[in-house]
Amino acid sequence: MKVIGKEKTYEIEKDIDSKMTLNGEEVNLDVVSESTDSFHVIHDGVGYDVYILEKDELSKTYTISVNGNQYSLQAKSKFDELLDQLGMSSLAEVKADNLKAPMPGLVLNVLVKEGDSVSKGDAILVLEAMKMENNIKAAADGVVKSIDIKKGQAVEKNQVLISFD
């Protein structure tokens, strides 16, 4: 797997015996997972606090913090690189057609109107579910075609909330 940073690219491999190589050289890491997005890593007697600050599983991009320093990374498997070489990586891009409710809840606020252009990651609406407010975000760039719900409306899981062009 390649991990691409702003200034460097790293080749990382892990074999079936959990041995890890970095750019062809074997490295020994002691990794303790403190939570889903928090780790403590020891390498050559030096400790590192690693936090995943942002992650986009679809594009395999991550923002991490290592001992307070932030880094933006992208992970590419051999399959991802092959798709790039064949010019097929754009086939995996998401086209927004309909925004569906990820869970049952109550629409607290609609943050867009018909005709608005939205970018991937923009907050579209606020949905209350299980006594928590959830910002529902755009999965891709698009233009709001229709809003099929209104503020104060109860919605069911997978109900179409907003349609996009």
Image (spheres, rainbow, N blue to C red):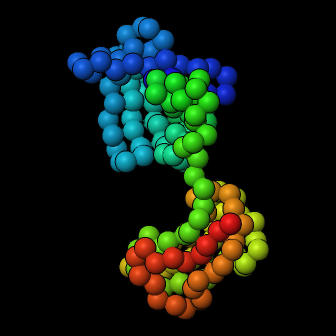
Q: Nearer the viewer, residue 148 or 46?
A: 148
| Position in image of residue 98 (x %, y %) | 56, 69
Residue 16 located left or right of residue 134? left
> In which quadrant is the C terminus drawn?
bottom right
Q: Is residue 165 above or below residue 140?
A: below
| Position in image of residue 3 (x %, y %) | 53, 26
Q: Is residue 100 above or below residue 32?
A: below
Residue at 63 percent of width and 81 percent of height: 147
Q: Residue extending furthest bottom?
A: 152
Which image quadrant for residue 59?
A: top right
| Position in image of residue 21 (x %, y %) | 39, 14
Residue at 65 percent of width and 68 percent of height: 164
Which image quadrant for residue 141?
A: bottom right
Q: Residue extending furthest left?
A: 17
Residue at 59 percent of width and 23 percent of height: 85
Residue 41 located left or right of residue 65? left
Residue 76 located left or right of residue 25? right
Q: Nearer the viewer, residue 69 or 93?
A: 93
Residue at 52 percent of width and 24 percent of height: 82
Q: Is residue 115 above or below residue 20?
A: below
Residue 52 in view (yes/no)? yes
